[in-house]
Image (cartoon, grey):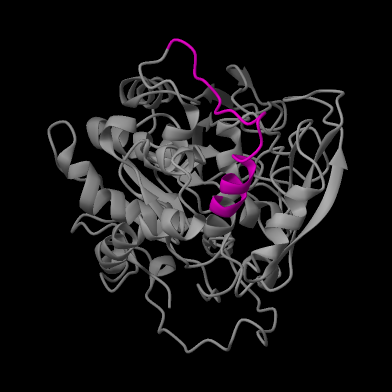
Amino acid sequence: MAGTPSRRSLVAGGTAAALASPLLAAQPAQAAPSAERRPTRRVLPGADVAAAQGWRMLRGRRVGVISNPTGVLRDAGHVVDSMAARDELNVVGVFGPEHGFRGSAQAGESEPEFEDPRTGLTVYDAYGADTEKLAGLFRKAGADTVVFDIQDVGTRFYTYIWTMYRAMAAARQTGVRFVVLDRPNPIGRRADGPLLTEEYASGVGLKPIIQQHGMTVGELARYFNGELLPREGDGGRVELGVVRVRGWRPDTTAQHTGLPWVPPSPNVPTPDTASAYAGTGWFEGTNLSEGRGTTQPFQFIGAPYLDYRYSDRLNALGLPGVRFREGYFVPTFSKYTGKTCAGVQILVTDPARYAPLPTAAAMLVEARKYDGFAWRKDAGQERPYWIDKLSGSPRLREMVDAGEDAAAVTRAWRAEVRAFVRQRRPYLLYG
């Protein structure tokens, strides 16, 4: 590797062997203005910080990249294209997550292995791959350094963070360095929601973290490396480096970064979708449409059996920072294709006060009062209800079925949130 940078780096891996680079240098924390008055700042994701230095921390390495369409620079060029165009870098392969490297696949799908026409690189299908398969892909590509650059949306059941976790475990197994090009959490630092229990681990929640974790992927990688990887397999940590974001404050959301929003998946077209999804993703575990097949997935919620009273009841609750517009929509795919659904459009009136999980809990409680309501079954599984995997345990479903109100549902996870906030603190990088 060219040069020997100082150990005063912000390699946030928590290991003595973490990648050292001037690009990873620590920056002093600054006080943030209030969310309501905050101006848009110039934010530089880790990828732009690394590119501005000519990717020097990757020179002399055999580099594999885990990315998707969100791995873009401020000029809208992709990080893989930027790396592949440089003669001094040796990119040996790309690993595509759910939806694929170039983003051509729908939810729950991926792109099969192919040769990328722009770069000539082999793109390997990494979606759903376990640690052993990923380790095999790293060996097949001949990588000695794996770079992760994907925009997360801040929610436990979004699969990219678990691709990262498994890739870290595979990198540890194969002796490969792991580098995260960090990006802002689009829904900020707020931590909320139930903790996943081990017996309900799945591809939409592999390890026990709370639902809205309030961390960047770089911070999560540090947390995984310090708290979770040492408990798995033969233990130990991966050699981890994190290239920090510059200019980002964690009490801001995506709208304040000045960065282009590239949909991290086809059904998260806007930052507003990401914010709502943290809670309304639960509706995937019901027989209500979560708005897939509309122009506003996860902001439209409804079903043929709902009516105008659903919005009236929700608005009567006076939930902070949100109103519910009576809405009707016809999904073009997914649930109720071609059928008219009655329901609501979520309108966030005050992002600083809007709490997506308590809001979604109230929406579930009110939807449960309709005779047509049902929980989505996961056929052939020992844990038959999809909602239990999304929420992390049967507790949410059982409380809603028992007629508990939304306040009681929310209180049930408060102690879990407090404990997680304490546990995550040493791994935070911003603010």
Q: Nearer the viewer, residue 76 or 393?
A: 393
> Up-down: is 128 above or below 84?
above
Question: Can residue 211 be seen in this snapshot?
Answer: yes
Residue 383: image location, x then y, percent: 38, 22
Q: Nearer the viewer, residue 11 or 390?
A: 390
Q: Specify start and end residues of the magenta stretch as a single range.
A: 361-380
Residue 250: image location, x then y, percent: 50, 72
Q: Residue at x 81, y 23 (%)?
A: 337
**Count of all numbered marks drawn on residues in the image:** 0
Q: Residue at x 61, y 72 (%)?
A: 43
Quarter of the figure with residue 272: bottom right
> Up-down: is 74 above or below 88?
below
Quarter of the figure with residue 96: top right
> Up-down: is 86 above or below 266?
below
Residue 320: image location, x then y, percent: 62, 71
Residue 66 placement, left or right of 351: left
Single out the residue that lies furthest toward the left: 234
Whether residue 355 is in magenta: the answer is no
Q: Nearer the viewer, residue 396 or 169?
A: 396
> Up-down: is 200 above or below 161?
above
Q: Residue at x 29, y 68 (%)?
A: 425
Question: Can residue 278 be seen in this snapshot?
Answer: no
Residue 93: image location, x then y, percent: 51, 30
Quarter of the figure with residue 13: bottom left
Quadrant occupied by the C terminus: bottom left
Residue 117 placement, left or right of 399: right
Q: Nearer the viewer, residue 406 or 101?
A: 406
